[in-house]
């Protein structure tokens, strides 16, 4: 009944997409083989779409075909922001996206993705794999929704975003129409920003038409691939809102429990490999893309002013606890992340931060 209702609702709202969705076969368990459908919030062409395809190939190969997963990218089975609906209602068994896309379903889930002024990517991985982060995300965000969570990617440090005009003071934020999902967007709202949530495929058209005055996306490589530099030239940093963003794989808990331990381990290993692949790939390609944006496309790199960062940071320390106080799960997850953040500060300061500052003094040349 739930699946029929889901298809009916999407037929009314989504037209052709829903018709296509109703033609896909349900998963089957035959001769010990399991078939899943996975729906994604991301398009097929980009790095995230490629990563999902690689994940499904790994699972099929490693399981010797005992578990095969068919990937349906954004718009192929359901609309981008309907991926979790599809999994919860049985139209798909697995979904892929970013936790803050599902903020309407959970007060705590956005904290899984990232927290403004929070953890960098490597700190998040430490939390996920060695600080019980996966278990905590399950307990406080995904299990209450009937889902199993696995981290399946990290963007690393993001950029602050693209703006049609220069942004120097708090007053420049008032009335701005800006695309920023997640907790960062909630903070900007308190400065009078009209925060608009759009899936990736709709960002460039909205920016081109003037429906939005600016947008954040990911970083130089992904942003250049999307063509954002063709519309606006002011590129701000740092990405205070997303120092490293976890992408989520989420699985219908009932389907997850049907897997034996070997298949569960294969899915976990595939997700962990995807997590590493995406973070490493972005790290590998962002600098070249950044140079092209500056040298070939006339993009202006602009740092947020100290005044603005201080104001946003102070506001974050007020807004984030308020959001976390909406539910006991959100409060618990927020407190876990704050504790991890505190435990990481000294080591990150004495290691990565100190080294990056010291590295500037060494002038290495090819020989």
Image: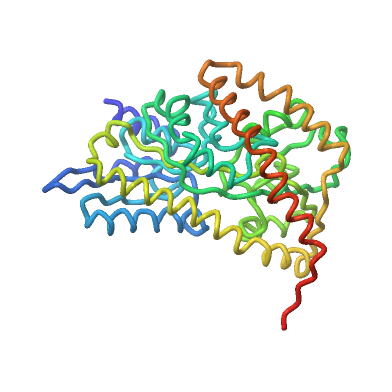
Left or right of residue 245: residue 195: right
Q: Residue at x 53, y 38 (%)?
A: 127
Measured from the top left, where is residue 13 in percent x and y? 45, 34
Q: Residue at x 28, y 45 (%)?
A: 36
Quadrant of image for the C terminus: bottom right
Q: Is residue 26 visible?
A: no
Looking at the picture, tell me which residue is in the foreground, 34 or 270: 270
User: Which residue is at the far bottom?
Assistant: 367
Looking at the picture, tell me which residue is in the foreground, 206 or 158: 158
Q: Residue at x 21, y 46 (%)?
A: 34
Looking at the picture, tell me which residue is in the foreground, 32 or 165: 32
Q: Residue at x 60, y 40 (%)?
A: 198
Measured from the top left, where is residue 82 in percent x and y? 45, 36
Measured from the top left, where is residue 46 in percent x and y? 52, 58
Number of marks in the rendered image: 0
Looking at the picture, tell me which residue is in the foreground, 340 or 202: 340
């Amino acid at each position: 009944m739930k699946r029929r209702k889901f298809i009916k609702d999407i037929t009314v709202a989504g037209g052709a997409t829903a018709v296509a969705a109703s033609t896909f076969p349900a998963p089957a368990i035959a001769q010990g083989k399991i078939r899943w459908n996975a729906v994604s919030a991301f398009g097929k062409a980009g790095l995230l779409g490629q990563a999902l395809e690689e994940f499904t190939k790994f699972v099929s190969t490693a399981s010797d075909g005992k578990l095969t997963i068919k990937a349906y990218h954004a718009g192929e089975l359901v609309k981008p922001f309907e991926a979790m609906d599809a999994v919860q209602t049985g139209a798909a068994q697995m979904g892929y996206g970013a936790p803050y896309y599902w903020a309407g379903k959970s007060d705590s889930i956005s904290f899984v993705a990232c927290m403004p002024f929070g953890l960098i990517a490597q700190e998040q991985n430490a939390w996920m794999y060695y600080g019980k982060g996966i278990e905590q995300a399950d307990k406080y965000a995904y299990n209450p929704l009937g889902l199993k969570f696995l981290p399946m990617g990290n963007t690393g440090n993001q950029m602050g975003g693209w703006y049609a005009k220069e942004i120097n003071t708090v007053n420049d934020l008032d009335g701005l129409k800006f695309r920023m999902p997640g907790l960062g967007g909630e903070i900007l709202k308190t400065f009078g920003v009209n925060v608009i949530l759009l899936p990736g495929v709709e960002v460039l058209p909205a920016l081109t038409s003037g429906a939005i005055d600016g947008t954040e996306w990911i970083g130089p490589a992904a942003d250049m691939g999307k063509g954002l530099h063709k519309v606006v030239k002011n590129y701000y940093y740092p990405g205070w809102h997303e120092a490293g963003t976890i992408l989520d794989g989420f699985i219908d808990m009932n389907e997850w429990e049907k897997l034996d331990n070997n298949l569960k381990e294969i899915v976990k290993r595939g997700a962990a490999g995807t997590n590493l692949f995406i973070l490493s790939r972005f790290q590998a390609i962002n600098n070249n893309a950044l140079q092209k944006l500056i040298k070939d496309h006339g993009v202006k790199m602009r740092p947020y002013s100290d005044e603005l960062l201080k104001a946003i940071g102070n506001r974050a320390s007020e807004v984030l606890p308020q959001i976390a106080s909406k539910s006991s799960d959100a409060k618990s997850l927020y407190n876990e992340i704050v504790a991890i953040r505190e435990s990481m500060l000294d080591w990150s300061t004495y290691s990565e931060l100190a080294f990056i500052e010291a590295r500037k003094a060494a002038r290495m040349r090819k020989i």
